[in-house]
Amino acid sequence: MLKRLLDYNDGEELDLIVMIKNSQLRHTKKDKLYLVLEFGDGSGEVRGNYWDADQRDAEMFASGTIVELNGKREEYQGRPQIKIYSLRTVGPEEGYDLEQFVKSAPEKVADMREEINQYVFAILNPTWNRIVRYLLKKWDKRFFEFPAGKSNHHAVRGGLAFHTLSMLRDAKSIADNYPQVNRSLLYAGCILHDMGKVLELSGPAATQYTAEGNLVGHLVLIDEQIMLAAQALKLDLESEDLLLLRHVVLSHHGKFEYGSPKLPQILEAELLHRIDDLDAAVYAITNSLQHTKPGTFTEPLLSQDGKKYYRPKDDAALDKAPRLE
C-alpha cells in the first residue's frame, strides 16, 4: 500500500504528489522572501517552508496547485512539518485531479440529506419551515458539498452538512430533555446558522475566503438570504416569527469578540450558540486525537486556546469512532 502524507514518521524522506492547500508569501527578519505552504492529500495536511522564494514562485505554487513534493518529515515546536528539498508542479496530463486530494465527511451525502430532511419535517412553524425548505433547495449542491470552515473544524467536503446534522442530533436530545425549548426554532437555527458559508467560502478544494466572505461574512450573508427568501415567499417581513429566526442565526457566535453582532437573548439562541461551540470543539479535539499516538499529547490546538489533549493508551471509544480526516 502506497504511503500518504501523514503515514510518514519524523526523519523519513518522502516523494509524493500532493496538493498545496494554502500558500502565503512572507518576509524573514532579514527581509528575504519565503513561502509558507500547507500540503495535503486524503490523509491530512502538513506545513513546510519554501525558502528563498520570489513572486514567480508564489504564482507557480499558489493554493490549489498539485505538486510533486520531495523532502523529509520533521518536527518543529511540537508540530509536524516538511523540510522541502524540491517542488515540481504536476499538470492534468499526468493523470491527477484535485478531487483526489480533498477529504470528505465520514457520512454519505445521501444519508445526511435524508436525515436532515427528517428534521425539516419536525419544524412545525410554517414561516420557519418554508424558509428552511426554500434555502435548502436553493443551495442544495453547495450545502452538501462545502466545508464548514477553512481549517479549524469540519474543513472537509460535506463538512457543512455533517456539522449541521451533528448539531441537529444534539438539539434533539436537548429538546427531548427540556420541554420548554422551542424545538422548531432550534432546528431551523441549526440548519441555517452556517449556511452563509456557501457564499463565504470558495468550495471544498483549496478552500479560501471569497470577497463576500472577507468583506461581509457568513452571519450577515445568511441573514440577507433569510430576508430574500421571506420576500420571495411573500411572508410578513415584520412578523415576530421572522424576527426570532433572524436573531438565533445572527447571535449564534455568542460573544461580540467572536464576531457576533448581537448576544443571544432568547433561550433557543443561547442553546444554538452552545451546541455550535460544543460540536466544533468535539470535532477539532477528536480529529487531533485521531492523529496522535496513544500515550502522547496532541499538538496545541489554536481553536482551543492552544491547549493540548492527551490520548490515553487504551481508548476503545476513540479507536472505534469514525475517522474524521
Image (cartoon, rainbow, N blue to C red):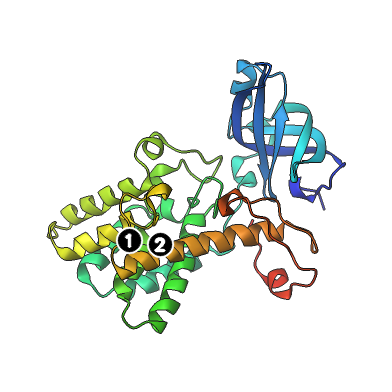
**According to the image, label 2 marks what residue?**
273
Q: Amino acid at mark 2?
A: His
Most foreground residue, 296 or 182? 296
Category of crowding for the residue at label 2, using alpha-carbon neighbours closer than 10 angstroms: few (below 14), some (14–19), many (at least 20): many
Pick the quarter of the image with the C terminus. Answer: bottom right
Q: What mark, if any, has residue 34 been given in the picture?
A: none
Q: Residue at x 34, y 63 (%)?
A: 189
Report the side of 153 relative to 307 (left or right). left
52 versus 282 height, above or below: above
Residue drawn at point x = 76 percent, y = 37 percent = 82
Is any part of residue 139 visible from this angle?
yes
Task: Read off the residue under disc 1.
Answer: 264
Residue 283 lies in what quarter of the image? bottom right
Instruction: Report if residue 137 is visible in the image.
Output: no
> Compared to 181, does 97 lie above or below?
above
* Total labels drawn: 2
